[in-house]
């Protein structure tokens, strides 16, 4: 194993750098900027059973050190993702990918997961029970241990591939929810999705984005996401993919030290399309500087 | 072709009330098309700011922008020799091919900027075109001489201080034309779109990335949701649906 290599269960990644769902399109779009094979993997845009048009605009607002988004899971539906988007990505990317699954009810989650389960290049299923931007769905599934456990259990019964639950930080006790997911058979966790937030135009007093509330992410949330990874790591044995405000190699080393095995980079991809390859290139230098021989040996070292 | 390029500011000067001309020097090797835009990183702001290309040479880019909020205000304070990081070659620009007969370029305010680049290309192509440009008042007018060197220009101002009093659509009503290219405020675009003639319109929408990733900037088209940053910003009149 190389010094950047990490294991998510039985899946060996060349490096832990994964662009986060919704911030990297279907992946192939980024091949216009750089050779995407430098990435550890790619997490696809959240996918629903049927095509989804998303929310009205404005869907995005700039905040200090981050953004508020309310895209509303615009996607062409699972069939089109499997027959059009993944084959296009295959032409540019030769590693395994992560499918990100969303739904408005339990059956839909299970159906989408079952369909992705048949796709060879999908290494694992990331279950988004934490999207704050869709009515009647998303985050509401991720805010109680019972519903997370229920969804996880039902998907696990229906699929063969590893199931990772992507959790919402908008809860009172995320450790309880993480433990419930592990007990229900989750193979790993993705921590965390966006924080429920708001932006108001001071001139008019009106909310800036159409849905009034949206999901806040970017550099501003890093300390909170890091804390959550640290806390949850103490209570679960399954691997954690850390996400929230990561913009540089130091951030990655911090998340891994807190207990993450791999990381996802989100909002920064929108403003710096080269952030992920730059992190991959910078990591070995930073590791030499800190006398770290391999990333896998520092997972959770902050707890020692 | 999309490219990230670091440019040096050559000049950044006021052209009209709150309107600045930013001249950048560096490689312009991304084959810019009229109607395309760049996305500018401004220090202390998380999102980049999309600005259309006004004109260019092999080694310089001209951008005209209006100070709207804090980002463009900060941009207006940048000085010669400072550097700016731009994502270049973004969007799908004006398509010159379908424009036949008498062509009119319709610009509202700072929307005139990308039309200047288009006028240069139309001139090169030997097209028969005029420009109808609308402004708030005399203080907000810019690039009139530059446009006049390329084509006949008709001006409207809301106050009547220059040209005809009223809107660009008041002038359009009085003239015969076959095809239009429009860029300006949404209300102007809607009014022009309503006239039912064939043409192309350049839209603005709040953007995250500017290159088709985040799906923030969508608009209504006859073929469903389309992204302003990649399918647009320029759309054919018959594919747009305004509510
Ligand atoms: C494709 C495209 C081309 C453009 N070309 C030009 C141009 O050539 N000249 C020019 O003066 N302006 C142009 N604009 C508008 C320009 O991007 C905005 O005026 C600018 O982003 C405002 O930034 P701010 O920080 O000053 O304003 P703020 O209101 O403080 O900005 C807050 C946020 O809203 C966004 N925003 C605000 N107004 C607009 C708008 N009208 N369109 C899109 N996003 C907006 C900003 O980018 C920022 O993310 C263009 C917009 C688009 C989408
Ligand atoms: C524009 C945008 C779209 C997103 N779409 C999704 C999505 O479809 N599914 C999902 O699970 N998370 C989505 N997210 C959340 C990110 O994957 C990521 O978990 C979160 O933004 C935190 O990381 P960051 O701070 O690096 O952005 C989205 C985030 C952004 C900014």
Image (cartoon, rainbow, N blue to C red):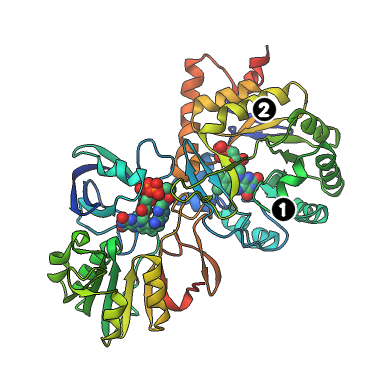
User: Measured along the vertical axis of the image, is residue A253 above or below residue B106?
Assistant: above
User: Measured along the vertical axis of the image, is residue A164 above or below residue B123?
Assistant: above
Residue at coordinates 57% horizontally, 17% vertically from top-left?
A293
Q: Position of residue B145 (x, y in %)?
A: 12, 66
Judge by depth and name the residue closer to the eye, A124 or B36.
B36
Residue at coordinates 64% horizontally, 39% vertically from top-left?
A193
Question: Are discs 1 and 2 located on one and the same chain?
Answer: yes
Is A259 left or right of A149, judged from the image as shown? left
Q: Identify the secondary structure beneath mark 2.
A: helix
Quadrant position of ligand 2:
top right
Cβ at disc 2 under 8 Å from ligand 2: no
Is B135 left or right of A166, judged from the image as shown? left
Q: Position of residue A135 (x, y in %)?
A: 70, 54
Q: Residues within 10 Å of mark 1 (few under 14, many from 20)?
A: few
Judge by depth and name the residue closer to the eye, B21 or A118.
B21
Is A241 left or right of A143, judged from the image as shown? left
Please state which of the two labelled residues, at mark 1 or mark 2, is closer to the viewer: 2
User: Measured along the vertical axis of the image, is residue A60 above or below residue B74?
Assistant: below
Disc ID at residue B90: none
Judge by depth and name the residue closer to the eye, A218 or A243.
A218
Q: Identify the secondary structure beneath mark 1.
A: loop
Cβ at disc 1 under 8 Å from ligand 2: no
Disc 1: which residue: A119
Q: CA distance from mark 1 to mark 2?
A: 32 Å
Is residue A22 at all visible to an observer of this figure? Answer: no
Disc 2: which residue: A228
Is B88 left or right of A282, judged from the image as shown? left
Q: Position of residue B96 (x, y in %)?
A: 31, 74
Q: Position of residue B214 (x, y in %)?
A: 53, 51
């Amino acid at each position: 194993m190389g010094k950047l290599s990490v294991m998510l269960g039985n899946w060996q990644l060349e490096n832990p750098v994964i662009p986060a769902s919704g911030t990297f399109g279907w992946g192939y779009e980024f091949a216009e900027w750089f050779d995407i094979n430098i990435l550890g993997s790619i997490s696809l845009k959240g996918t629903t059973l049927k095509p989804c048009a998303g929310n009205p605009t404005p869907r995005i607002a700039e905040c200090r050190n981050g953004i508020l988004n309310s895209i509303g899971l615009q996607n062409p539906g699972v069939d089109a993702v499997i027959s059009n988007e993944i084959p296009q990505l295959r032409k540019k990317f030769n590693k395994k990918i992560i499918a990100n699954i969303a739904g408005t009810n339990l059956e839909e989650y299970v159906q989408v997961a079952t369909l992705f389960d048949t796709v060879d290049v999908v290494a694992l299923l990331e279950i988004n029970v934490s999207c704050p931007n869709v009515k009647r769905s998303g985050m509401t599934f991720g805010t109680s241990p019972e519903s997370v456990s229920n969804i996880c259990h039902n998907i696990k019964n229906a699929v063969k591939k590893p199931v990772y639950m992507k959790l919402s930080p908008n809860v009172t006790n995320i450790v309880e929810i993480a433990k419930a997911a592990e007990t229900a058979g989750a193979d790993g966790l993705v921590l965390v999705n966006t924080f429920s937030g708001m932006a108001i135009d001071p001139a008019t007093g009106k909310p800036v984005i159409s849905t009034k509330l949206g999901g806040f992410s970017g550099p501003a949330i890093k300390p909170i996401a890091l804390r959550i990874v640290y806390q949850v790591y103490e209570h679960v044995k399954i691997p954690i993919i850390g996400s929230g405000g990561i913009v540089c190699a130091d951030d990655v080393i911090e998340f891994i030290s807190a207990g993450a095995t791999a990381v996802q980079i989100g909002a920064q991809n929108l403003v710096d399309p080269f952030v992920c390859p730059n992190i991959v290139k910078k990591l070995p230098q930073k590791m030499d500087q800190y006398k770290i021989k391999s990333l896998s040996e520092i997972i959770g070292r902050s707890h020692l | 072709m999309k490219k990230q390029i670091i440019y040096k500011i050559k000049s950044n000067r006021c052209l009209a009330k709150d309107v600045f001309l930013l001249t950048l020097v560096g490689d312009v090797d991304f084959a810019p098309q009229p109607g395309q835009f760049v996305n500018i990183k401004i220090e202390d702001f998380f999102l980049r700011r999309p600005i259309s290309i006004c004109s260019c040479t092999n080694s310089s880019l001209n951008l005209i922008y209006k100070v709207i909020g804090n980002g463009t205000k900060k941009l207006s304070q940048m000085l010669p020799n400072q550097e700016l990081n731009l994502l270049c070659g973004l969007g799908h620009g004006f398509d010159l091919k379908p424009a036949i007969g008498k062509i009119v370029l319709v610009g509202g305010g700072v929307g005139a900027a990308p039309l200047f680049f288009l006028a240069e290309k139309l001139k090169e192509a030997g097209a028969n075109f005029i420009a109808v440009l609308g402004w708030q008042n005399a203080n907000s007018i810019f690039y009139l001489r530059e446009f006049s060197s390329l084509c006949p220009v008709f001006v409207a101002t809301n106050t009547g201080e220059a040209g005809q009093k009223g809107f660009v659509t008041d002038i359009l009503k009085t003239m015969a034309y076959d095809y239009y290219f429009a860029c300006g405020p949404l209300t102007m675009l809607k009014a022009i779109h309503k006239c039912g003639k064939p043409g192309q319109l350049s839209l603005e929408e709040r953007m995250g990335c500017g290159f088709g990733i985040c799906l923030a900037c969508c608009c209504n088209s006859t073929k469903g949701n389309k992204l302003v940053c990649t399918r647009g910003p320029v759309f054919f009149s018959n594919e747009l649906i305004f509510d």
